Image (cartoon, rainbow, N blue to C red):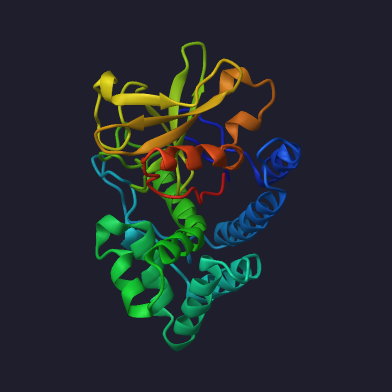
Amino acid sequence: MSLSLEGYPQPGLDDIRSALQRIIGQPVIAVPYVHYRQRVLEAQWAVWARLQDVPGKVVTAEEVGETRTPLITGPDVTLPPEMLTTLLATLSKYMERDSLAYDVAQVLADSARVDAAVLQETIRRACFPRAGAEVDDLADELSVSPVGLGYLGRLIGAPFVRATGEVAIQRRAGSAPARGISGGCVVCGAHPTLAILDGQVGRRTLCCSLCGFGMPASRRTCPFCGNCDENQLTVLGKTDDVPWWVEYCSVCGGYVKTTDRRRFRGGDAGCAVVQDIITLHLDLRAQEAGYTRSQPYVALT
């Protein structure tokens, strides 16, 4: 199963593997990081594949009304404890032992052995902060970093959110709402972190950082706060010889990394997760300039 919104392509795992291999050796590419992201993706896709085998038992989505946006919220996503703990253990093996994420993973695993609901609650809070309490409160209870806990919760939750989003779209005859909530994905409500330009006029597609679906958007509007004052929408790092740059908003301080797909001959530019890795240096530049990345890209595509 592979769905898309507005014709935006959704590559398969083999396509992503091939694209990742092709970027190794390019400037500013850290090979260990590429290998880490590939292993994480393979673990996420393995869970997603299991969800396809038992869609009626594991993946559930409530009937979606014509006006409901986003299509899914926290209660719609079923999170089987056994699948969660297995994915957590797998991801932990790929993390550096002295990293923040690894430390959080160990605490979360210990807590989940006592009460499986802790892991489920972490994922719901990390993936759907609008639905209830923030992940910060839970991080205080566990005495871990809220940033690390949020990242890990989204990393584990991504395949479940993706699968549930596909079910919800199918129930709407393959279509999603034309507009999302302010600053959020029409499918799951998460923020975009990447934008792709393609077509003769450079149509802009925002890539959700959690479910991975793409949605069309105006090039003259901030995807986070809706600001459309071009004097407060700025570009960083754009030159004639590179196909990617940062677009940031002076009103809310948010930014997205943009890739101009028209400048590529191959298909790598359409693969959002690969673009996120290639443009990691742009995150550093934007954050050094004082701008904030809304959420890390943890989607499967």
Q: Compared with residue 301, is residue 7 higher up or lower down, i.e. above or below?
A: above
* Camera sees residue 175: no
Q: Give the residue displayed 52% in from the left and 66% down from the top.
A: 101
Residue furthest to the bottom: 114
Residue furthest to the front: 288
Numbered marks: total? 0
Q: In what quadrant of the picture does the C terminus appear?
A: top right
Q: Compared with residue 43, is residue 9 higher up or lower down, i.e. above or below?
A: above
Closer to the camera, 21 or 53? 21
Residue furthest to the top: 200
Q: In the image, 149: left or right of 30? A: left
Image quarter for residue 140? bottom left
Closer to the camera, 167 or 155? 155
Q: In the image, 266: left or right of 48? A: right
Q: Give the residue displayed 35% in from the left and 59% down from the top.
A: 76
Q: Give the residue displayed 70% in from the left and 38% down from the top.
A: 19
The picture places residue 160, in percent across and down from the top left corner, at 48, 59
The picture places residue 243, in percent across and down from the top left corner, at 57, 23
The picture places residue 61, in percent across and down from the top left corner, at 37, 56
Q: In the image, 1: left or right of 63? A: right
Q: Compared with residue 100, is residue 241 higher up or lower down, i.e. above or below?
A: above
* Camera sees residue 228: yes
